[in-house]
Image (spheres, rainbow, N blue to C red):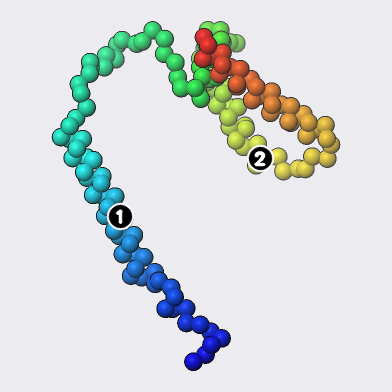
Amino acid sequence: MDTTHPETEKDSIPFYPDHVRTEFYVMVGIIVLAIIVGILGLMFPIGLQEPADPLNTPLHVKPEWYFLFLYQILAILPPTILGIEGTAFSVVSVMIALVVVTLWPFFDRKEDTSKTAAWVRVAVTILGLLTVIALTIWGEVS
């Protein structure tokens, strides 16, 4: 018997069929659980509430907190800007800003040689974040 190479096959668990069998049991368990939840949902449906009225809009609709800054931008813009409807202008401008922010790393490949440019980028980023935070708080309060 060679003592320099211990037998590792006896010390380990083979992937097939042991691990495959275990994963199969987990998959079957998840499917059975989903079927049970579905059957319980059919047997005990949620209580009936008043039906939705598509013509009746609540007085003050507020979006979730992560959209409040966009909602506040819509609220503070005038009805028309440069002959364009304010809503369309704000939606298009926000979309353009998001596309620019998303694609910026792909176009900016140069290294900053001056510290001024780096500080300007940091300042613009902080100013943008503070603006989003301020608009979100303003939208929540109003």
Picture residue at 56% right of the left edge, 13% below the top: 138
* Residue 66 position within the rendered picture, expressed as x and y whole percent measured from the top left: 51, 25
Q: Is residue 94 above or below residue 109?
A: above
Picture residue at 53% right of the left edge, 14% below the top: 139
Which numbered disc, 1 or 2, marks the residue closer to the eye? 1
Cα–Cα gap, marks 1 and 2:
41 Å
Q: Is residue 30 above or below residue 81?
A: below
Q: Nearer the viewer, residue 37 or 76?
A: 37
In this view, the residue farthest toward the bottom is: 1
The three-letter code of the residue at mark 2 reads: Pro
Q: Quick check: can you spot residue 84?
A: no
* Residue 5 position within the rendered picture, expressed as x and y whole percent measured from the top left: 53, 84
Picture residue at 23% right of the left edge, 49% below the top: 32
Kind of element beneath mark 2:
helix
Residue 72 is left or right of residue 109, and the answer is left
Q: Quick check: can you spot residue 138?
A: yes
- Ranked by sequence position, the earlier of labels 1 and 2 is 1
The three-letter code of the residue at mark 1 reads: Met
Q: Nearer the viewer, residue 136 or 88?
A: 136
Q: Which mark is residue 105?
A: 2
Q: Quadrant of residue 53?
A: top left
Q: Residues within 10 Å of mark 2 (few under 14, many from 20)?
A: few
Kind of element beneath mark 1:
helix
Picture residue at 62% right of the left edge, 32% below the top: 101
* Residue 135 position within the rendered picture, expressed as x and y whole percent measured from the top left: 58, 17
The residue at which mark 1 appears reads as 27
Q: Which mark is residue 141?
A: none
